[in-house]
Image (cartoon, rainbow, N blue to C red):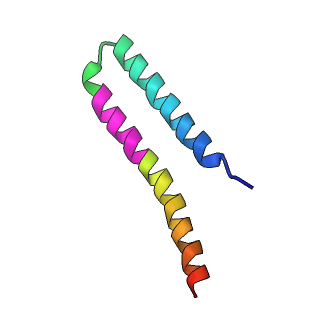
Amino acid sequence: MIDFTIIFKLAGLGICITVINILLDKADAKEWKFPISVVGVIMGLFIVMQYIQQFFQVVQTFAR
């Protein structure tokens, strides 16, 4: 069965970062939009890295 939790995690993170950027735009704090977006991308990469690590552990157990 396919696990869709990674899709929901990344979509939720994207929605949160988008809402924060919209709020920063309304508050006229546009200089914070880029750093917040970079933090969002880094958090997304950490989420994906956990799944990649699990994938390599499964492949390693099959290789033995």
Q: Check the image and report above or below for 17 versus 39.
A: above
* Corner quadrant of residue 28: top left
Residue with the most extreme left position: 31
Q: Which of 44 and 23 is in front in this view?
A: 44
Q: Is the magenta stretch mostly helix, strand or loop?
A: helix
Q: Check the image and report above or below for 57 versus 50.
A: below
The percent position of residue 26, horizontal first and vertical second, equals 38, 11
The percent position of residue 10, horizontal first and vertical second, equals 53, 41
Q: Check the image and report above or below for 55 versus 36.
A: below
Numbered circles on residues, count = 0
Q: Nearer the viewer, residue 29 or 9?
A: 9
Residue with the most extreme right position: 1
Residue 37 shown in magenta: yes
Range covered by the magenta-colored residues:
33-43
Image quadrant containing the C terminus: bottom right
In the visual, does 39 lie left or right of 63?
Answer: left
Image quadrant containing the N terminus: bottom right
Q: Which of 54 and 64 is in front in this view?
A: 64
* Corner quadrant of residue 17: top left
- Point 35% across, 15% down: residue: 25
The percent position of residue 18, horizontal first and vertical second, equals 45, 25
Residue 61 shown in magenta: no
